[in-house]
Image (cartoon, rainbow, N blue to C red):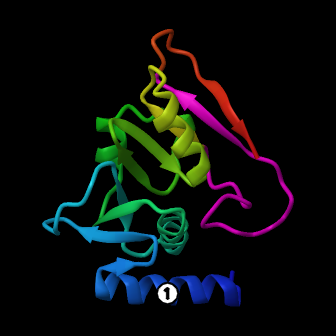
């Protein structure tokens, strides 16, 4: 599958950001970088995953500070944070005590941080084609799921 020009431009922009270490409306930090006001979105992703780059760009554009960890294997971070296998996606993030799995929109992360529910986090299970970073614009709806609640259930947190 070839990247669309918009996605290519976003990837190039993020490449420039990664080289310089900062972006308008947010920062990209790497392990060992300077500290900034919490909460920072820490992302664990494969070096080769381009859709993860798109999601990082989305979060920066939404005003989040982002710290990227490029790893060979993202499974250990998923396991350590209780991501159910059925909810896994390509990258895992941590922000202010919550796990964010996959292409969860920034607006849902903001809502989570404002509401502070008793849960482990949010997931956009799989790789929804219209989610931030995927940007396929197919019109296919997708859901964001709240997981790790005290009752052990998963709840639809948002419909997109």
Q: Is residue 37 magenta?
A: no
Q: Position of residue 154 (x, y in %)?
A: 59, 23
**145 is higher (above) or lower (below) than 139:** above
**160 is higher (above) or lower (below) than 79:** below
Give the residue displayed 48% in from the left and 18% down from the top: 149
Q: Position of residue 58 (x, y in %)?
A: 55, 66
For the N terminus, the image quarter is bottom right
- Please give the range of residues in magenta: 125-148
Q: Position of residue 141 (x, y in %)?
A: 81, 48
**Does residue 55 appear to the left or right of 5 in the view shown?**
left
Which residue sits furthest right? 139
Q: Position of residue 10 (x, y in %)?
A: 56, 83
**80 is higher (above) or lower (below) than 18:** above
**122 is higher (above) or lower (below) than 31:** above
Give the residue displayed 13% in from the left and 66% down from the top: 32
Give the residue displayed 56% in from the left and 30% down from the top: 146
Q: Is residue 145 magenta?
A: yes
Q: Residue 40 appears in which quarter of the rendering?
A: bottom left
Q: Residue 134 appears in which quarter of the rendering?
A: bottom right
**Does residue 59 appear to the left or right of 37 in the view shown?**
right
**Does residue 54 appear to the left or right of 97 in the view shown?**
right
Tally of numbered tags: 1
Q: Which of the pair 57/81 is nearer the observer?
A: 57
Magenta stretch: helix, strand or loop mostly: loop
**Label 1 sits on residue:** 13
**Does residue 159 appear to the left or right of 76 in the view shown?**
right
Give the residue displayed 69% in from the left and 37% down from the top: 158
Helix, strand or loop at disc 1?
helix
Q: Residues within 10 Å of mark 1 (few under 14, many from 20)?
A: some
């Amino acid at each position: 599958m070839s990247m669309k020009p918009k996605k290519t431009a976003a990837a190039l922009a993020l490449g420039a950001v990664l080289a310089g270490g900062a972006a308008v409306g947010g920062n990209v930090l790497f392990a060992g970088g300077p500290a900034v006001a919490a909460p920072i979105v820490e992302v664990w992703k494969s070096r080769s995953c381009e859709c993860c780059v798109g999601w990082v760009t989305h979060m920066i554009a939404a005003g989040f500070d982002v710290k990227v960890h490029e790893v060979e294997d993202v499974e250990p971070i998923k396991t350590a944070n209780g991501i159910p296998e059925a909810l896994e996606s390509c990258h895992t993030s941590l922000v202010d005590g919550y796990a964010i799995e996959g292409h969860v929109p920034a607006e849902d992360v903001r809502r989570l941080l404002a509401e502070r529910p008793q849960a482990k986090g949010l997931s956009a299970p799989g790789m929804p084609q219209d989610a931030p970073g995927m940007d396929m614009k197919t019109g296919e709806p997708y859901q964001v799921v709240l997981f790790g609640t005290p009752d052990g259930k998963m709840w639809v947190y948002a419909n997109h």
